[in-house]
C-alpha cells in the first residue's frame, strides 16, 4: 500500500515536471525574457519569412537594430522619457531604408507610399496616430505631435500632413520614400513573377518597425511605424496606427508593439488584449503575448509582439520563422536576434 502510494506520488511528480518543462519550452520557443532593470528599450523591425539570410543582409539588420537601440538608450540614460526614447528609436529606423517605414516603405497597388504610425504614453494613456501620410519624413514624430499638441488622437491623409507642416515637421517629395528596389518588387508581383527566394522580403515579411521602453521614472511607452503591406490596396490602413491593435501602453500593465498581418491584429484587438489579460486575469507578460498571438493566429494571421511590463521585464513572441528584434537594459544586458530558435512553418 505504502509502496503504491509512493509510486503514485512519483508518477504525479513526473507528470507535473513534464508539464512544467513543456510549458517552459513553449515559452522559450517564441519569447525571450530578461531580468528586471531600471530602464530598458526593446525594438523590432518586422516579422515573417526571416530564415537563412545572407550574411551581408544579417549585418545590415543587426546594425540597424543596434543603432535604433543606442538612440533610445541614450535618451533614457540622460533621464529622458520613455515616449522620447520610443520616438528616437523609430525615427532612426524610418530613416534607415532597410526597414519598411519612412524611407523604404513598401508600395501600394498604385505604386505610391501610404505610411501609418502611432505612439502611446503609458503614464497618461495619451496617444497619437497618423495614417495614409505620403510626405512626412518621420511619421512617428507626427504621431507624437498629434498626441502632444492636438485635441484628437488620430489624423489621416492631407489633414495629418497639413497639421505636421503647421508645426514645422519636415515634409519630403514622394520620390524620397520610394526606392528603386521597391518599384522592381511591385513590378514582379504585378507580373506574377515574384518568388519566395528572390522576393522573400515582400512576399512573407512584414518589415514594420516598433519600440517599447521604460524610463528611469518607471513610465512605459510604445510606438509603431510602417509603410504597411506590399501591394496593399490604396487607401488600406493596417493595425500599426490603431491604438489597441498594433500599439498599446499602460503603466499598470505593459507596453507592446506589433508586426504582422494587420487585419488580424485589428480584428482581435491584439495589443489591448495583452494589457487586458494582464490587468484582468493577472497573466504575466510572456503568457499574455502568447495568448494574444494565438487568438490573432486563430483568425488566420501571423506576426509577433515585443513587450515590456511595469517591472521592466522584457518579452517577445511571434509565430513566424523570424522577427528582427533586440533589447538593451540599464543592467548591461543586450541582445539582437532574427530567427526563431526552433519554429518552422510548414
Ligand atoms: N502590421 C503592418 C500592417 O498590417 C505590417 C507589418 O507589420 O509589417 O500594415
Image (spheres, rainbow, N blue to C red):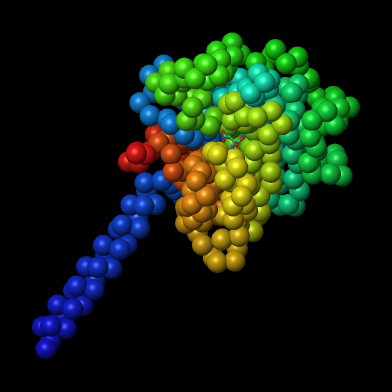
Q: What residue occupies the far right of the structure in this picture?
A: 166
Image point (57%, 54%), residue name:
274
**Percent x, y of residue 129:** 74, 39
Rendered-image quadrant of the N terminus = bottom left
Whether residue 165 sits left or right of residue 238 in the image: it is right
Residue 202 visible in the snapshot: yes
Q: Is residue 97 above or below residue 250?
A: above
The answer to which of 334 and 271 lies nearer the viewer is 271
Rendered-image quadrant of the C terminus = top left
**Percent x, y of residue 324:** 48, 32
The answer to which of 131 and 213 lies nearer the viewer is 131
Image point (18%, 78%), residue name:
8
Q: Quadrant of residue 78?
A: top right
Image point (72%, 31%), residue name:
235
Q: Quadrant of residue 151?
A: top right
Residue 39 visible in the snapshot: no
**Percent x, y of residue 286:** 47, 53
Count of labels shown?
0
Q: What residue occupies the far front of the structure in this picture?
A: 191
Q: Is residue 268 above or below residue 92?
A: below
Q: Is residue 25 above or below residue 163?
A: below
Image point (15%, 80%), residue name:
6
Q: Quadrant of ligand 1?
A: top right
**Percent x, y of residue 343:** 35, 41
The answer to which of 279 and 346 lies nearer the viewer is 346
Whether residue 340 sits left or right of residue 187 in the image: it is left
Amino acid at each position: 500500500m505504502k509502496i503504491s502510494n509512493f509510486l503514485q506520488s512519483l508518477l504525479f511528480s513526473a507528470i507535473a515536471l513534464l508539464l512544467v518543462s513543456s510549458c517552459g519550452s513553449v515559452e522559450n520557443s517564441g519569447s525571450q525574457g530578461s531580468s528586471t532593470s531600471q530602464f530598458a528599450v526593446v525594438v523590432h523591425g518586422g516579422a515573417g519569412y526571416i530564415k537563412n539570410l545572407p550574411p551581408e543582409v544579417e549585418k545590415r539588420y543587426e546594425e540597424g537594430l543596434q543603432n535604433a537601440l543606442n538612440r533610445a538608450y541614450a535618451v533614457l540614460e540622460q533621464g529622458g522619457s520613455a515616449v522620447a526614447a520610443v520616438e528616437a528609436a523609430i525615427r532612426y529606423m524610418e530613416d534607415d531604408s532597410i526597414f519598411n517605414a519612412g524611407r523604404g516603405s513598401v508600395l501600394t497597388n498604385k505604386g505610391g507610399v501610404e505610411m501609418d504610425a502611432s505612439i502611446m504614453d503609458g503614464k497618461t494613456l495619451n496617444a497619437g496616430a497618423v495614417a495614409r501620410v505620403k510626405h512626412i519624413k518621420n511619421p512617428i514624430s507626427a504621431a507624437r505631435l498629434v498626441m502632444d499638441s492636438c485635441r484628437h488622437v488620430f489624423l489621416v491623409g492631407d489633414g495629418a500632413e497639413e497639421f505636421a507642416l503647421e508645426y514645422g515637421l519636415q515634409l519630403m517629395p514622394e520620390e524620397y520614400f520610394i526606392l528603386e528596389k521597391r518599384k522592381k518588387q511591385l513590378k514582379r508581383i504585378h507580373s506574377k513573377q515574384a518568388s519566395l527566394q528572390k522576393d522573400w522580403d515582400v512576399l512573407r515579411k512584414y518589415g514594420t518597425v516598433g519600440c517599447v521602453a521604460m524610463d528611469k521614472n518607471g513610465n512605459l511607452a510604445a510606438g509603431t511605424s510602417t509603410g504597411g503591406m506590399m501591394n496593399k490596396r490604396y487607401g488600406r490602413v493596417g493595425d500599426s496606427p490603431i491604438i489597441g491593435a498594433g500599439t498599446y501602453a499602460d503603466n499598470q500593465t505593459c507596453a507592446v508593439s506589433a508586426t504582422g498581418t494587420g487585419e488580424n491584429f485589428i480584428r482581435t484587438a491584439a495589443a489591448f488584449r495583452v494589457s487586458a489579460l494582464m490587468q484582468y486575469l493577472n497573466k504575466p507578460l510572456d503568457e499574455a503575448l502568447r495568448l494574444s498571438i494565438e487568438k490573432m493566429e486563430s483568425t488566420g494571421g501571423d506576426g509577433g509582439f515585443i513587450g515590456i511590463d511595469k517591472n521592466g521585464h522584457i518579452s517577445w513572441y511571434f509565430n513566424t520563422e523570424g522577427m528582427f528584434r533586440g533589447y538593451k537594459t540599464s543592467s548591461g544586458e543586450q541582445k539582437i536576434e532574427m530567427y526563431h530558435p526552433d519554429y518552422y512553418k510548414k
